Image (cartoon, rainbow, N blue to C red):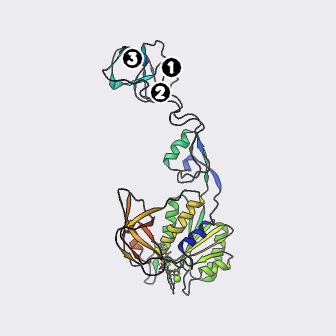
Amino acid sequence: MISVQEAVNIIQSNLAKPEIIEVSFKEAVGKVLAEPISADRDFPPFDRVMMDGIAINYDRYNSGQSMFNVEATQLAGAPRLTLRQADNCLEVMTGAMLPKGVDTVIRYEDVTIVGNKAVVNDIEIFKGQNIHNQGQDIEKDHIIIKPSTLITPAEIGVITTVGKEKVKVYKPLKFAIISTGDELVPVEDEPKEYQIRQSNSHVFKSSLDQIGMDAQVFHIVDDKETLKGRIKDILEEFDALILSGGVSKGKSDFVPEVLEELGVTKHFHRVAQRPGKPFWFGTVKNKSVFALPGNPVSTFLCFNKYILPWLRKSYRLEEKIQLAQLEEDFSFKPDLTYFLQVKVNNEKGMLKATPVKGQGSGDLANLVLADGFIELPPDKYDFKAGELFPLIPYRRLD
Ligand SMILES: Nc1nc2c(c(=O)[nH]1)N[C@H]1C(S)=C(S)[C@@H](COP(=O)(O)OP(=O)(O)OC[C@H]3O[C@@H](n4cnc5c(N)ncnc54)[C@H](O)[C@@H]3O)O[C@H]1N2
Ligand code: MOO
Ligand SMILES: [Mg+2]
């Protein structure tokens, strides 16, 4: 049996290598950028008027002039005008180019316009006010978004502004999600008394959908030959496999032997942890095969602790480790890493973790009461309120 850290290291030394593809910016949200995005021109591309009002020559104002004749109007989306006479002004609109010959914009609220004449109210005016200067935000050719950034709507703003109709992204991996077990029936069925509805696959599928992966769900009964035949075909077609169930010591737990017979190299079976001890991991032709223990909490923990970080690392995304402070004393005797379910409260930036005791790894209802797991190391029995531990959150913590 290996430690949690050894399991993490083994999994992360077998990263997936997603291909680079080009997609329309319309399909890019949720994908990971595979090229730098740089400014095709200055940001902003011209001296941009920031307020609707008038534009003047500040020196005139400074030398005592407060009334200006309006020469013309500079609209947004129109070519740049030039002030003909230095003691006149132009009306200017937000988003327009600052006309030539003017250097200061005064809001309509701060002037009184009667007919063709604008009089500046008795307020303080600063040279260059209300102008967003060309290149002030970012200069042409400067890299604005680095590769390996997760594309969110904020990145779409930049991608479209610089005219990238198509962007290079890492292709989503094709996951096969395989549940095993004769006791499992589809969600829409009424289970007999010895059956339950299948849930693990839907948990994986919805998690993977959320992060833009391509996932297909399969169910296979507890028959060794059937398992072998179906998994053989699935291995051909998919980039990564996540199985649940059938990895422990039961009479129908065929998954590890079937995988090995199909040529999947076993890297480990069993990790010194609770829940999720019977976790099995192997690879074949650079495809990772995660065979997770069937109990819903074990499966959920393994997915969040091992698979999501492996995926983020495969996509070269940064991994942030968060620590949470235990709110109550807690004891766990066995010599295993214990993943304790916790409710997390953010108190002025400090994450406080209160244990949510459930009925063990079959108690999936308890998952909805908690926000994550904290990782309690195996070398201690007693964990004290106030101590900090790594947090594996599965919800957004606001
Ligand atoms: N003699 C031993 N028995 C068990 C051990 C052990 O060390 N020695 N380990 C226990 C631990 S820990 C776990 S976890 C489970 C793991 O079992 P399997 O991976 O073999 O999973 P199954 O036997 O197929 O199912 C376990 C449990 O989970 C339910 N399940 C399975 N798949 C799903 C699914 N897709 N959706 C919802 N629920 C699912 C299944 O009905 C079982 O109740 O083994 C212990 N036994
Ligand atoms: O992994 Mo098992 O979940 O400890 O029941
Ligand atoms: Mg079993």
Q: Nearer the viewer, residue 27 or 185?
A: 27
- Within 8 Å: ligand 1 and the Cβ of disc 1? no
Quadrant holding the N terminus: bottom right
User: Which one is closest to the eye, mark 3 or mark 2?
Assistant: 3
Badge 3 marks a residue whose secondary structure is: helix
Residue 343 placement (x, y as % from top left): 37, 67
At x 60%, y 37%, the residue is 141
Residue 377 visible in the snapshot: yes
The amino acid on which the numbered mark 2 sits, given as a three-letter code, is Ala
Residue 215 placement (x, y as % from top left): 56, 64
Which sits earlier in the primary sequence, circle 1 or circle 3? 3
User: Mark 1 to mark 3: distance in Å?
Assistant: 19 Å
Q: Which mark is residue 62?
A: 3
- 322 up-or-down from 77: above or below: below
User: Mark 3 to mark 2: distance in Å?
Assistant: 24 Å
Taking the view exactly as shown, the residue that stands out farthest to the left is 122
Residue 231 placement (x, y as % from top left): 63, 74
Taking the view exactly as shown, the residue that stands out farthest to the bottom is 251
The amino acid on which the numbered mark 3 sits, given as a three-letter code, is Asn
User: Mark 2 to mark 1: distance in Å?
Assistant: 12 Å
The amino acid on which the numbered mark 1 sits, given as a three-letter code, is Lys
Q: Which mark is residue 96?
A: 2
Answer left or right for 359 relative to 82: left
- Label 1: which residue? 100
Which sits earlier in the primary sequence, circle 3 or circle 2? 3
- Within 8 Å: ligand 1 and the Cβ of disc 2? no
- 370 up-or-down from 122: above or below: below
At x 54%, y 82%, the residue is 248
Badge 2 marks a residue whose secondary structure is: loop
